[in-house]
Image: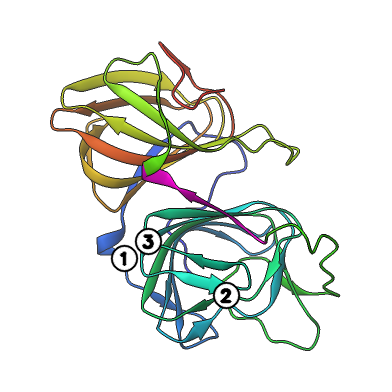
Amino acid sequence: MQALYTPPAASEARVLVFDMAQCAWQPTDDRGLWLKPVRHDNARGLFLGQVRFEAGTRSGLHQHQGVATSFVIDGGLTDYHGAIAIHETGINLKGSTHDAIAYRHTVLVSRLEAPVTYPHESEFSGVHAGSHHASVLNEKPDVPPEVNVPVDQMRHEDTLVRGVRRQLIFDYAGTGTDRRMVQLTMKPGVDFHFQAGDVTEFWVRGGLLSVNGEEAHGDCFIVCEPGARVHFRSPYGALLLGWAEGREASQGNLFGF
């Protein structure tokens, strides 16, 4: 799998923009599953990018060994817990065990933070970085395999950055890490700086902004390496999903740490 970006061993404090419309879908071992990887680390089970299911395609039975988050751009998936719909984020925690199917064409923005286990008797679907075979036992059958968050219905919060509001999607409580996933709404005229405290990544859901002088529009990913100095300016407004592995240094608190 050819990724657009490979994180360096030591941060170079770069800010990178990737236009996914300019990237081709890459096939997996399953003819109905396709990937557009920004990051793809098969050794550690790390992934950032987009996933496409053709109608009638299954993920295959698998168990997550850490957090995975997926925002539905189009379509939806169904497992034994029910369905996740368009513009919702599905959050899988460690131990989440399920087999999901797409009944129609489906596209996800996904971030995988740990390997995924498949039963010995099954083949890998190719959709998960870090897939490996092992015994699969759902030790918490009363816990749903995912938490589905209706992103646009979440409460808006003040970030203390003028013109920027936050909707908290996931605060990673109980996962052993202190991270955040949010949606940020930037009003027209927003102009601010921050410094990334750790790995910080965004997907532009809509609108237009300048990132250190480089244009980022709908369906662009932005990767900020630890220590990167970032200048966001949006004369006409923008809507972003963001993941932060540590609090940024800014005039406010973008991610709600």
Inspect the image, locate mark 2, and give the three-letter code of the amino acid beneath it: Ala
User: Which one is in front in this view, the residue at disc 1 or the one at disc 2?
Assistant: 2
Q: In which quarter of the image is residue 73?
A: bottom left
Residue 3 placement, left or right of 247: left
Identified at 30% across, 32% down, the residue is 185
Identified at 46% across, 18% down, the residue is 253
Inspect the image, locate mark 1, and give the three-letter code of the amino acid beneath it: Cys
Location of mark 1 (residue): 23
- At label 3, counting other C-alpha atoms closer than 10 Å, the crowd grade (few under 14, some 14-19, many 20 or more) is some
Location of mark 3 (residue): 86
**Front-lying residue, 69 or 249:** 69
Gap between marks 3 and 1 measured at Cα: 22 Å
Q: Where is residue 167 in the image (x, y as percent from the top left)?
A: 42, 33
Magenta-tinted stretch: 145-152
Residue 222 in view in this figure: no
Nearest to N terminus: mark 1 or mark 2: 1
Q: In which quarter of the image is residue 53?
A: bottom left
Nearest to N terminus: mark 3 or mark 2: 3
Element under disc 2: loop
Location of mark 2 (residue): 100
User: In this rendering, is residue 146 above or below 121?
Assistant: above
Identified at 45% across, 27% down, the residue is 228
**Front-lying residue, 4 or 137:** 137
User: In this rendering, is residue 23 above or below 190?
Assistant: below
Gap between marks 3 and 2 measured at Cα: 15 Å
